[in-house]
Amino acid sequence: MQHCITLLGSTGSIGNSTLNVIARYPERFSIYALTAHRNWEKLAQQCMRFTPYIAVVDDAQTAIQLQKRLCEVGCMTLVEYGRAAIASAAADTACNTVVAAIVGAAGLEPTLAAARAGKRILLANKESLVMSGALFMEAVYESGAALLPIDSEHNAIFQCFPREPGLHGEVTRIQLTASGGPFRLREPITLLNVTPEEACKHPNWSMGRKISVDSATMMNKGLEVIEASWLFNLRPEQIHVLIHPQSVIHALVSYSDGSTLAQLGYPDMRTPIAHALAFPTRIVSGVEQLDLAKVATLTFEPPDYDRFPCLSLALQALHEGGAASTVLNAANEVAVEAFLARHIRFTAIAAVVSDVLEQVQADVSTTLDAVLDIDAQARRAAQAAIVRYLYLVD
Ligand code: NAD
Ligand code: MG
């Protein structure tokens, strides 16, 4: 099958890794659309290299700059802008595969558009499932879209899960591994003065800034537990978190007979991306073969919920159900942005999320507008909470 791809968020970390794999197989993958937020210079380079039919950015000013550069170099890629144009690129009949690699809530509309249009979706944007799992999965089932996870833990579970839906009931539990991030061994009290630079310095993975902070607070693992509950239709108590600092085992699936299957590999997103791009076949990703003798030691420990209150908040939201995870996600995005802008302390991220979860309560949403409405409500509450935790850095 020739894959004609829309890559949402092509200028980001996942976008880059995806293009790195795709570049190895020009006969197998072609690009219909590349989309980005504001980084027109990088997008222009990608357009020259991959000649997509269309490139879409968020705003008119960025589109003008991109268009100018593409004209200068004689690149024929069409340029469009705006949220609706990004969603159209994901739903267009000219593409059959959509890589959803926009960060945060901005990814929901185009990823949902791809789901409604019945695409093969390679999902990195976990926030769409956290915000609107019920709506999103319903769209996937109704349209017959194929959902392939590229979040490394979920891709690992997918690889170890029974293929036939009739056998899914044999899975007793899954374990998502987590490195524990840069602050795994720090005393909670010392986290007060953590800087954005320290928080973004992940020991094993190189990622965008938002997910790096989420990894440092372990909110990322909480979002992933929620993501897994939707992707694999599991009850909250069947999903466990296991700290594994080496990030070599990405997830484990346990069965009723006592067997546990795991997927291993070096921490490099090109492996899950290549797996999902080529599924059910296998292609070379550029990632080295795993040498366990060289790795030598794999260690495991239970998560420390006192040190990582964001993990507990996410699990609490999952248990609560309704729109709690929509609220959690929105509050977290606002709080992480405020931390990166040095407006609040690292430890205030959990405090903001907790306050907002208490204030904003709503039932599960059945429409996109209702989801976006709760998201906006939670963002307003988070902005108000941030004022209470403001911390002025000199
Ligand atoms: P990133 O910040 O490196 O890139 C984000 C991309 O989204 C960029 O191309 C940016 O232009 C685009 N974008 C941002 N805001 C936008 C907006 N408002 N409108 C349109 N486009 C916008 O992020 P990343 O690390 O590549 O992560 C992307 C997604 O993949 C996230 O949901 C993250 O949780 C998930 N993910 C990332 C990794 C990783 O290793 N980086 C691993 C697993 C899952
Ligand atoms: Mg992950």
Image (cartoon, grey):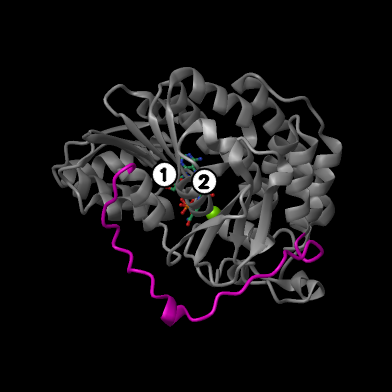
Write the start and end of the magenta stretch as one range: 279-308
Q: Quadrant of the C terminus?
A: bottom right
Report if residue 280 lies within the magenta region: yes
Secondary element at tag 1? loop
Q: Report which quarter residue 321 is drawn in.
A: top right
Please identify the dominant SS of the magenta region: loop
The residue type indicated by label 1 comes to Gly
Of callouts 1 and 2, the N-terminal one = 1
Ligand 2, by image quadrant, is: bottom right
Is 23 on the left or on the right of 312, as rendered? left
Q: Which residue is mark 1?
A: 9
In which quadrant of the rendered view does residue 341 lie?
A: bottom right
Q: Residues within 10 Å of mark 2 (few under 14, many from 20)?
A: many
Is ligand 1 within 8 Å of the beta carbon of the residue shown at mark 1?
A: yes
Q: Which residue is under mark 2?
A: 103
Q: Position of residue 298 (x, y in %)?
A: 55, 75
- Label 2 beta carbon less than 8 Å to ligand 1: yes
